[in-house]
Image (cartoon, helix red, strand yellow):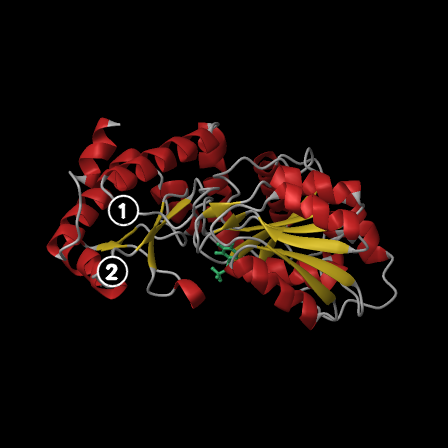
Amino acid sequence: MKIPFIMTPGPTQVNERVRAAMAREATNPDLDASFFEFYKASCEKLKKIYNTEEDVLILGGEGILGLEAACASLIEEGDRVLCIDNGIYGKGFGDFAKIYGAEVVFFTGDYRRAIDVEKLEEFLKEDHDFKLATFVHCETPSGLTNPAGEIGELLNKYDILSIVDSVSSLGGEELEVDKWGLDLVISGSQKCISSPPGLTFVSVSKRAWETMENRKTPIASFYANLLIWKNWYRDKLFPYTQLSNNIYGNDVAFDILLEEGDYVKRHKEIAEMVRYSLISAGLELYPIEGHANTVTTILVPEGISFKDIYNTMLDEHNIMIAGAFEDLDGKVFRIGHMGENCYEEKLYITLKALDTTLKSLGADIKGSIHQYFARD
Ligand SMILES: *Cc1c(COP(=O)(O)O)cnc(C)c1O
């Protein structure tokens, strides 16, 4: 099987060191005392990436498990939940909240811009009787990053707990969980962390633990119950068998980021270069404002189809890019520059192939996309 060069916004390419670590000899993670220490040490690394001193968990499951577990664990029947929505994932949070009985109120922003914090503040002045709010840090389908720090501070002003989807921002965007006062911040292994899909991460504030402990009704789930994790280290007991080899690989992925240090800067610089090159060539980006540093979403030029771009990139260049779904289906294409994908040479190869592809399909490209990139 020929493996394409994946430049999708997750899953990303996986470093050889991570793949080698996944092949480590397996232990019994339920019984081997050293595995508990290993897991704890890996959580310490994750805390550094989250910028938190609070508890963090590494759960066996894809990012969606983390999002659903956050809702299942905090929400009780009839709770008022504010769903801050300016994209597909932001809106989808409302559905999770409803499953667990929330009365959901939407604050809907412009889908092509980051959340307008002033407008949110005006909204909250009128109505702030919410137990919690959900929002997405980076809206991966549209390529937008929301000002999570300002939103967090605003929610704290009104004592509203926060559930934050940082699946595609952790490790690529600035994220200060403690400084910004965020309660449950969810991420995953296959985006900027760049280990294979299979793990989801959650940071849990003290308030969030207390809220779970003081519920009137039990959490209506087992796998999506965060509270059963509270004392895993004290009791040396995991709620279920851990995905040990995923965790081995993922731990090395944490190391790679931490060894580098300023990975946010790398993402910022590459993202700016990518946007500059595309815009210089006459292409239009989907976001008008609030562009993400981990993914770029581009409008499909008039007269050509997404399918043709995708297929030509794959068939002629062996490079896999992505489209998007729901309302954006067929209208945009996306290049992921997160984690392991976010290196100059990988973007150069991708943009060069894109330049050839778009020109062969008859798009009106000014100059050469990759040359703008190389000269920037
Ligand atoms: C990738 C991603 C998730 C995880 O969900 P999948 O659709 O299953 O990949 C959740 N939230 C955001 C913002 C993501 O980018």
Name the kind of residue labelled 2 in the image: Tyr
- Give how far across and how far down residue 351 sits, in percent: 23, 43
Q: Quadrant of residue 86?
A: bottom right
Q: Please name whichever residue, 42 or 107, is drawn nearer the observer in this view of the structure.
A: 107
Q: What's the residue at 61%, 46% (across, down)?
A: 39
Q: Residue furthest left?
A: 360
Compared with residue 155, is residue 180 higher up or lower down, i.e. above or below? above
User: Does residue 347 appear left or right of residue 188 in this picture?
Assistant: left
> Tag 2, which secondary structure?
helix
Q: Residues within 10 Å of mark 2 (few under 14, many from 20)?
A: some
Disc 1 CB within 8 Å of nearest ligand 1 atom: no
Task: Give the residue pinned by disc 1.
Answer: 283
CA neighbours of label 1 inside 10 A, class few (<14), some (14 to 19), many (20+): many
Mark 1 vs mark 2: in front: 1
Q: Is residue 73 left or right of residue 323?
A: right
| Near-viewer residue (250 or 274) | 274
